[in-house]
Amino acid sequence: MSLKAGIVGLPNVGKSTLFNAITNSHVLAENYPFATIDPNSGVVVVPDERLDYLCSKYNPKKKVNATFEFYDIAGLVKGASKGEGLGNQFLAAIRECDAIVEVVRCFENANVVRYNDDPVNPKNDIDVINLELSMSDLESVNNRIGKQESKARITKDKVALYEMPILLALKETLEQGIPARLTKGLSQEQMDYARKNFFLLTLKPILYVANVAEDDYGDLPNCANYQAVKEIADKENAVCIPLSCEIEYEISQLSSPEEKQEFLETLGVKESGLDRLVKASYKLLNLSTFLTCGVDECRAWTFHNGMLAPQCAGIIHTDFEKGFIKAEVYPFEEFKKVGDSLTSDTFIGNGSVGDRIEQMIREAGKIRSEGKEYAMKDGDVVFFRFNVTKK
């Protein structure tokens, strides 16, 4: 399941530094606008303590985390919707992404130039991005209205009749420079239809990253710039992740997990901002994880919430879905509860500790047999039974 989030923002807010830290790569990160013209992409693993725990018990030959793709998209500028600053290329790149991660500058640094030489102003920066994306969407909406209006009026086309009220409501919102996702008066069904059919930039789910200075990282309640971003995110019912892109990049360069953990402890935090960002981006797209495990491989698989067991089986292999019989399922929490109860005196036999744990779960009658209508849940540990007749 290939899904990606585009990292956007104004020039010199820390996008490429963040991307470098996320992917532990070395994308050009120069101190001038348009240092990144073509989007740089990187696939990152989604941290999962459940998978780590399974691996600690199975000691598999192979461990495979769920993955997520990030795109570093060049800085937008005022007038991008009209082609300013290579705006058309940037907007097209955003359109290819499933979600938007907007980096907002919250740090003061005279050595890092502002795109307009004004003082740091997170609200203004967000307004600029929203306006440019909204104006681009307004053009798309007006074009669609032009096509559907006559169909609705003259031929009474059912699709056009359904779409016109939605399009007009979106137009009214976008004309004010307000993102389409904040449109009022439309039902959830209408908003879902718009997302699926209109491909608007401002209907994409969004996550804000407040890029704060190192000195502010441990005192966020008193960081006015961060609080300004958080207030906007709260009003939109969006997520705001505070982090220091420079610190995260430094952490990404450390060679061992122990060094990284020690660094985090000196900052007084348990989890890196990047891990929080990756997890939040994953959830932003309504994604969850099911797990498969054994001595050969322990793997986390990505699925959309609401998918049924046969569909999830098809993520592993199409034959699994075609010949689906049943899914043998238990929650990860059951595995951990039994695993934590084991002592050195527990009989393991010839198999792995993980095999013994699963055997104990089965003997306790905690493994369920689920059919085709079962909706998979986050953290399900599953074994799919299937049969495909060869022709």
Image (cartoon, helix red, strand yellow):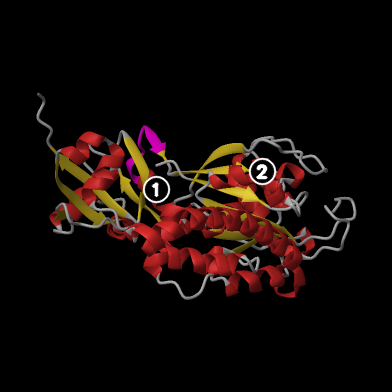
**Res. 245 mark:** none
Vertical position of residue 207 compared to residue 299: above or below: below
User: On the image, which quarter does residue 190 sit in?
Assistant: bottom left
Q: Which residue is mark 2?
A: 88
Task: Give the SS element for disc 2.
Answer: helix
In the image, what residue occupies the spot 80% across and 39% down? 30
Is 203 positioned to the left or the right of 210 in the image?
left
Q: x, y percentage for residue 317?
A: 27, 35
Q: Amino acid at mark 1?
A: Leu
Q: In the image as oriented, which residue stretches furthest toward the front?
A: 154
Q: Quadrant of the C terminus?
A: top left
In the image, what residue occupies the spot 21% across and 34% down? 319
**Closer-to-camera residue (356/29):** 29
Mark 2 is surrounded, within 10 Å at the Cα level, by few (under 14), some (14 to 19) or many (20 or more) other residues, namely some
Res 245 seen here: yes
Q: x, y percentage for residue 273?
A: 62, 56
Q: Quadrant of the N terminus?
A: top left
Q: x, y percentage for residue 275?
A: 56, 53
Vertical position of residue 286 compared to residue 83: above or below: below
Task: Give the SS element for disc 1.
Answer: helix
Is 90 positioned to the left or the right of 295 in the image?
right
Q: Is residue 57 magenta?
A: yes
**Closer-to-camera residue (3/83):** 83
Q: Which residue is mark 1?
A: 51
Res 243 seen here: no
Mark 1 is surrounded, within 10 Å at the Cα level, by few (under 14), some (14 to 19) or many (20 or more) other residues, namely many
Circle nearer the N terminus (1, 2)? 1
